[in-house]
Image: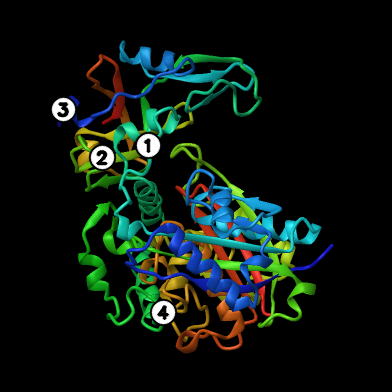
Amino acid sequence: MKTPVIVGAAECDLGITNKSVLELQAQAVTRALEDAGLSIRDVDGIATNAISRFSATQLADYFGIVPTFTESTFAGGSSFQMYIARAYHAIATGQCNVVVISYASNQRSAKSRSLSGVIEHHTPEAAFESVYGPLFPLTYYAMAAQRYIHDVENARNALDEVAISAREWALLNPKAYRFGTQSLSSQEMQSSDLISSPLTAADCCLVTDGGGAIVITSYERARDLKKRPISILGFGEATTNSSMTTHRNLRVMGSKISGDAAFEMAGISRKDVDVVELYDSFTITTLLSLEGLGFTDIGGAADFVLDKKTRPGGPFPLNTNGGGLSYCHPGQFGVLLLVEAVRQLRGECGQRQVADAKTALAHGTGGIFSTHATVILGAS
Amino acid sequence: MTLQASQFPYLPHEDAVSQTFWQSTRERELRVQYCKNCRVFQWYPRLICILCASQSLIWKRASGVARIDSWSRVHRVAQEGFVPPYVIARVLLEEQVIFLTRLVGSAGLNPICDAEVRLTWQELSDGRALPVFE
């Protein structure tokens, strides 16, 4: 069996690009390959989604390659953490030699985002849930937040702190949508418009264009490439629900299952992680993921973040690119969590670099807390 | 607080499995699937029991008593025809299944997690009705 490693990582243009999805995909893929010191002719594995019905096929054809491995699991924001696991197996077994994981969206330029999501009338969710008019996915996250506020002291302040901390990191990242703006104040958080109570506009991730790509190959192949390879130490995933009614307990999500599996495979403890990148679709997502992944007890995330330990310079560097809340959120953010984790482990992050980062965790959440996938990476 | 039928702008799709549920709403009865093997209720309606995978499912009438698991007041237009603000909730039916609904009346004005609520109905334009809670 070969040892899979990450050798390339890049973003495409972010923000408001006025470019097509395939143009942004091509940017992401070619930049990540350039970062690795490889060319598109070396690629024989493609993992992507959200281009068209046959996304991986589409992208392979666009690049004029004939892959022996394709993957398009459609699980929302956690898909790209899942692709790491699939690519790992494909490289380890020799099914293919170089996999590119990529994603891009032009949702901001194309104004393609809808508050109700995509309603498919033949599904139980359409008949029994959409009929009442929830925002999708927002109202489900809002109900999780409402329950959290009901049960946990200082929860509203903690949700504010998640967004405030993300903004502080974004102010250090020239690529961030909110770079060059100002720190967020508690007052701004409190005066933001309610969208689906208790969540306000300031609790919600950005709606931007953007995307990125990750290149995976074997350690053997990586030896003569440009950059020091990044190890894939562990991964885990859990798929819990598509309905708003099937997951019983809004306080404990599937991140518990995916996190436990990833840490067991990596054989390390929570304290060994130097930098943490969590999917922050909404402020509540970050709190529940901190708890599910075992960085705090259940109910402990509020006090954990209110210590301000997740801000730049603090002992628990969290969402160091500024996150979906203040950096970029192109519909599915998962690939950009991986890009930032790789860059932190390589020491490429300039002002926002976490000193001596040796281990990083990237955790994706998709749908309505539906899919959860955790990846743990190492610098050597 | 009375809701206009027009506040529920679309008619839910009905199929062979969900037909009993929807037809019962014409009589203002909330029916939930019950597995005779497992002796538990399940929501939403399916061909099989999600515990034992058998098709030993029958329909039982729910008591209409529930507790608010959580809720959210929606302030934006989800899609054309919905008129915000209104309250979406997950309620735990006495039958121990979570049900997505709206809260109306005083429960909708001041919803509180864990508070008890009771079933009422909002008519749809084709004579079926949506279970809501007050």
Tell which circle, 3 or 2, labels the residue nearer the N-terminal end: 3
Q: Position of residue B8 (x, y in %)?
A: 24, 29
Image position of A37 (left or right of B23): right
Q: Secondary structure at mark 3?
A: loop
From the viewer's perspective, is the residue at label 4 or at label 2 nearer? 2
Protein chain holding label 2 = B
- Residues A259 and A43: in front is A43
Cα–Cα gap, marks 3 and 2: 16 Å
Name the residue beneath numbered marker 4. Answer: A169
Q: Position of residue A287 (x, y in %)?
A: 46, 63
Label 4 CA crowd tier, 10 Å (few <14, some 14–19, many 20+):
many
As drawn, the label of residue B79 is 2
Q: Amino acid at mark 2?
A: Gln
Residue at the farthest right position: A1
From the viewer's perspective, is the residue at label 1 or at label 3 nearer? 1
Q: Do marks 3 and 2 both belong to one polypeptide chain?
A: yes
Protein chain holding label 1 = A
Residue B83: name its quadrant. top left
Label 1 CA crowd tier, 10 Å (few <14, some 14–19, many 20+):
few
Name the residue beneath numbered marker 3. Answer: B4
Q: Is residue A7 above or below residue A90?
A: below
Name the residue beneath numbered marker 1. Answer: A119
| x 54%, y 85%: residue | A348
Q: Are marks 4 and 3 in contact (CB under 8 Å)?
A: no
Instruction: Name the quarter where the C terminus of chain A is drawn.
Output: bottom right
Q: Amino acid at mark 1?
A: Ile
- Residues A207 and A170: in front is A207
Q: Are marks 4 and 2 in contact (CB under 8 Å)?
A: no
Cα–Cα gap, marks 4 and 2: 35 Å
Q: Position of residue A5 (x, y in %)?
A: 71, 70
Q: Position of residue B46 (x, y in %)?
A: 53, 23
From the viewer's perspective, is the residue at label 3 or at label 2 nearer? 2
